[in-house]
Image (tube, rainbow, N blue to C red):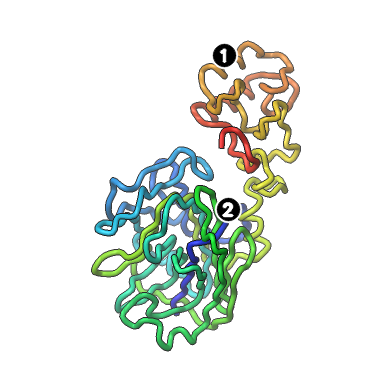
Amino acid sequence: MKILVCVAIGIVLLFEFQVAQAELVMHLEFEGDLEDTSDFGNNAIIGNSGQLISFEPNGRIGTALRFAGVDASAPPWIEVASSSSLSPGSAITMAAWVFKTGQIGGNAGIFFKGNLVGVQPDWQLGLDHDGVSNFGPISGFGAVNGCGIACSEAIAVAPLDANGVPMDEWSHFAATYDGQILKLYIDGRVIASDEHFDTIEQTGAPLYIGNRFLPSGNVGSFQGLFDDLRVYDVALSEAELWELALNDDGDGIAAINDNCFIVSNPSQRDTDADSFGNACDADLNNDCIVNIVDLGILRSVFFTNDPDADFNGDGVVNVVDLGIMRSLFSSPPGPSGIPNNCG
């Protein structure tokens, strides 16, 4: 069976989480490299047009991977070699943060394992430019077979907002299959589902990210950023996907309402009222960067109860707060899900 997720050029999303008992088989964090931080070593390599791929400091979580633009002659992508961990038998979850900065060229893959001629995709999650979101086994999608009889198989279709995937905004995409039900999630909510009873195809084809592959060349291209891509060999529950999309740090506050969504801070303490929680706001002069100026301010209030410099809220500015500043040095404050001046 082949699983397809194709999300039209118009979808929102959010992402990150902690899920117990789920086997994380690939986790690309893009923190300056293409290494898989799961236990399975599914590292990525640049497949084409390396000059069009770079790391962006202001990612959804830390840094992100930027695809610089649509290049019809040499579209960019990265790829991961096939492995047993990326060839699950009957269940899978795919999830990613996506930030679109330009038009989608063709049908661009976020995840695309397989190719479009002869051997059809094992599974995929992608962006489509036609305004329709599809998730299902669709043998022959975009290939010589066309759609044909395969379209009578289980396919979940969800019309999208006419404005398409929002520009210059992080969105969370996820898809699951448990051997019986196909589901597509946007921002932690199911937007499409359908039944299909089968095992997942295991072709041995590579996993492509940022594009969809034909032997004659890649088709479709993505313009924007990816961050924190994850693959699980189980179908996460709706509750787990909701948690993944809306509560990044486990403090019970949805990321879109959290003033520091990578550090658990249930009190949301923000003493300088700049929409960044103290727990991740070492920008003491509010110029949107933590630097030597902020270090000077911290030193001037050391061993006092200055509220803004007391990042951990223990009532005193000390070496713990200095350690927090060091961890945030040369970075903007946050990240915060609340609108702020450092956007």
Dots 2 and 1: beta carbons under 8 Å?
Answer: no
Judged left or right of residue 309, residue 4 is left
The amino acid type found where label 1 is placed reads Gly
Q: Position of residue 234 (x, y in %)?
A: 56, 67
Horizontal and vertical percent for residue 240? 65, 60
Give the percent coordinates (x, y) of residue 218: 30, 64
Q: Position of residue 164 (x, y in %)?
A: 52, 60
Residue marked by disc 2 = 15
> Is 254 drawn above or below residue 325 in the view shown?
below
* Residue at 32% over, 52% down: 45
Quarter of the image for the C terminus: give it.
Answer: top right
**First of labels 2, 1 by sequence position:** 2
In the picture, measured across the screen, residue 121 lies left or right of residue 11, that is left
Q: Is residue 196 above or below residue 20?
A: below
* C-alpha distance separating marks 2 and 1: 35 Å
Q: Residues within 10 Å of mark 2 (few under 14, many from 20)?
A: many
Q: Residues within 10 Å of mark 1 (few under 14, many from 20)?
A: few
Which SS class for mark 2? Answer: loop
Can residue 228 be seen here? The reply is no
Secondary structure of the residue carrying numbered label 1: helix
Q: Residue at x 67, y 47 (%)?
A: 250
For badge 2, the amino acid type reads Phe
Q: Is residue 285 above or below residue 254?
A: above
Provide the residue designation for mark 1.
Answer: 296
Give the vertical position of 323 relative to 54 (above or below). Answer: above
Quarter residue 245 falls in: bottom right
Image-based side of 23 in relation to 116, left or right: right
Q: Nearer the viewer, residue 204 or 268?
A: 268
Q: From the image, which quarter does the N terminus lie in?
A: bottom left
**Which residue is depicted at the point 44% across and 70% down?**
123
Mark identifier at residue 1: none
